[in-house]
């Protein structure tokens, strides 16, 4: 998909004086030689007294020596991991009209560009900064970016597109960001644009070459622009070309004990995006990771999981690898870069609160999907965290899945028909899929290890498939053909 033309953007200038000031001090940015995305629109705000920023969660403070400050809110359609991108630079102008201080955004925060040991990085009289490849956070020199080299390479490669549609607090309730199909379209497009950063910052980009206008015009335009990008992808990427989430069922359970650290590590090696894990609760209300209510099948022990405290369960199951707490599983998957698809078998209010707190502490909510056969459990999760993604599981074939999902505000429907039909994909009729799409619901299927059936499900355009062998999901995606592939800095179709 080529860059969209700029349409529907109000360009009226509120103050000629402010506009000329913003142009005069517009910074210069150095980009990686392989960078695929560049700014297109800049919204400025001029401060002549201390005040809150209208576009960033901070206060702009003007000291006695400062005449004014200029905030540049810089728009990209794409960050390599998500749609959209808004980064910031602040410059402070002294009484004599010279640049005396500057700050720039950095992964949700900001940092100063001037300190006792380092003067402002200037090109002539203008600020000159370096942009992190793909991610676009700003630094005063390449060395600051090289310290993040490993994270940057992963973000521009294996993790490209994983964040889908990005919705910051500035646009919460304005941009409809967490819809499954939109996220999947964005994921696939950005995955096709993944690249290896060179850390050769030889591309010089002058912000004066962007459209520069008052912030209020950019703010009004952004929600429509996001929808325009999604609509273009929806119109140009056929269902069978869309990126399918690869979920390792109980980890890569064909190769390691289910719901174990080994199964998570193997899932990551085999190309999974998420691991499906089962949640039950111990006698002391700790969420633990195990499928069965009984300890018999996996551990050879007569007894029920919920009858024992976590410390007792650890001792009882130690010889067979040991039951994991949810917190341990979360930390492992976070370290491996894996999302979580939680099958909530049993959950108390206390355990749910602890589970959500652990996710919040790690800022991992966007990487988790909460699934369950129990509508009441998912309704409680949604009530506690409206931004949480939920998936309603069901096995009945004669069921209005859309109404069921809508009744609890679920984001996905998950038909568990693998034991009901030799070819479960045949139960996903065109009418059934279209009804789910009209309701903006995602479709999850499991668990499937037959390559032909996996391919059939992918061709229908489902959103996610679980498998004990996640490498089969990756192989099927590669074999179907017609997907977007990356060549240089252009996305082309085979």
Image (cartoon, rainbow, N blue to C red):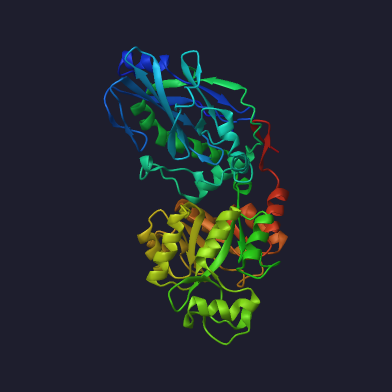
Q: Quadrant of the N terminus?
A: top right
Q: Which residue is drawn at 41% across and 67% down?
A: 352
Q: Residue 147: x and y, percent?
A: 59, 38
Mark yes or no: residue 446 visible.
yes
> From the viewer's perspective, is residue 345 above or below residue 406?
below
Number of dots carrying numbers:
0
Relative height, residue 368 to residue 84 (above, below): below
State the residue in front, 190 or 68.
Answer: 68
x, y percentage for residue 268?
65, 56
Q: Where is residue 328 in the image (x, y as percent from the top left)?
A: 54, 64
Residue 6 visible somewhere in the drawing = no
Q: Residue at x 44, y 64 (%)?
A: 355
The answer to whether residue 41 is above or below residue 441 is: above
Towards the viewer: 353 or 465: 353
Quadrant the C terminus occupies: top right
Please tell me which residue lies in front, 426 or 148. 148
Location of residue 294 with respect to 421 vertically, above or below: below
Q: Quadrant of residue 257?
A: bottom right
Which percent across, then down, holds residue 461? Answer: 59, 52
Q: Residue furthest front?
A: 116
């Amino acid at each position: 998909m080529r860059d969209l033309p700029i349409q529907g953007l109000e360009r009226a200038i509120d103050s000629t004086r402010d506009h000329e000031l913003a142009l005069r001090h517009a910074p210069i940015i150095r980009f990686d030689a392989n960078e695929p995305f560049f700014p297109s629109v800049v919204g400025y705000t001029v401060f002549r007294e201390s005040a809150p920023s209208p576009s960033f969660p901070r206060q702009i403070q003007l000291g006695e020596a400062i005449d004014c400050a200029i905030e540049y809110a810089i728009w990209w359609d794409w960050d390599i991991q998500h749609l959209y991108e808004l980064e910031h630079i602040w410059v402070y102008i002294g009484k004599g009209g010279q640049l005396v201080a500057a700050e720039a955004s950095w992964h949700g925060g900001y940092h100063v560009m001037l300190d006792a040991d380092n003067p402002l990085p200037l090109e002539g009289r203008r600020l000159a900064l370096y942009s992190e490849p793909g991610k676009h956070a700003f630094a005063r020199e390449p060395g600051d970016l090289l310290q993040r080299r490993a994270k940057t390479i992963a973000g521009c490669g294996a993790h490209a597109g994983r964040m889908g549609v990005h919705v910051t607090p500035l646009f919460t309730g304005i941009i409809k960001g967490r819809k499954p199909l939109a996220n999947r379209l964005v994921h696939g497009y950005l995955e096709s644009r993944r690249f290896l950063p060179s850390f050769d910052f030889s591309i010089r980009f002058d912000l004066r070459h962007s459209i520069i206008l008052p912030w209020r015009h950019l703010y009004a335009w952004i929600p429509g622009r996001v929808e325009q990008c999604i609509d273009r992808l929806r119109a140009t990427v056929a269902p069978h070309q869309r990126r399918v989430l690869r979920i390792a069922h109980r980890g890569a359970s064909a190769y390691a004990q289910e719901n174990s650290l080994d199964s998570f590590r193997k899932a990551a090696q085999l190309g999974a995006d998420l691991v499906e894990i089962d949640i039950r609760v111990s006698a002391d209300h700790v969420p633990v990771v195990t499928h069965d209510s009984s300890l018999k099948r996996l551990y050879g022990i007569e007894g029920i999981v919920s009858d024992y405290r976590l410390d007792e369960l650890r001792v009882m199951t130690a010889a067979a690898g040991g039951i994991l707490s949810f917190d341990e599983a979360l930390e492992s998957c976070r370290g491996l870069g894996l999302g979580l698809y939680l099958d909530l078998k049993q959950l108390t209010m206390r355990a749910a609160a602890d589970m959500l707190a652990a996710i919040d502490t790690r800022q991992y909510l966007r990487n988790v999907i909460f699934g369950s056969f129990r509508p009441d459990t998912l309704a409680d999760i949604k009530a506690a965290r409206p931004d949480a993604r939920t998936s309603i599981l069901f096995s009945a074939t004669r069921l209005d899945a859309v109404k069921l999902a809508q009744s609890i505000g679920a984001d996905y429907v998950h038909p568990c028909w693998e034991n009901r039909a030799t070819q479960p994909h045949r139960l996903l009729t065109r009418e059934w899929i279209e009804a789910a799409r009209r309701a903006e619901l995602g479709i999850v299927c499991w668990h499937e290890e037959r390559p032909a059936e996996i391919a059939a499900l992918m061709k229908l355009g489902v959103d996610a498939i679980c498998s004990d062998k996640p490498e089969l999901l990756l192989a099927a995606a590669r074999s179907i053909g017609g997907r977007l592939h990356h060549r240089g800095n252009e996305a082309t179709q085979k």
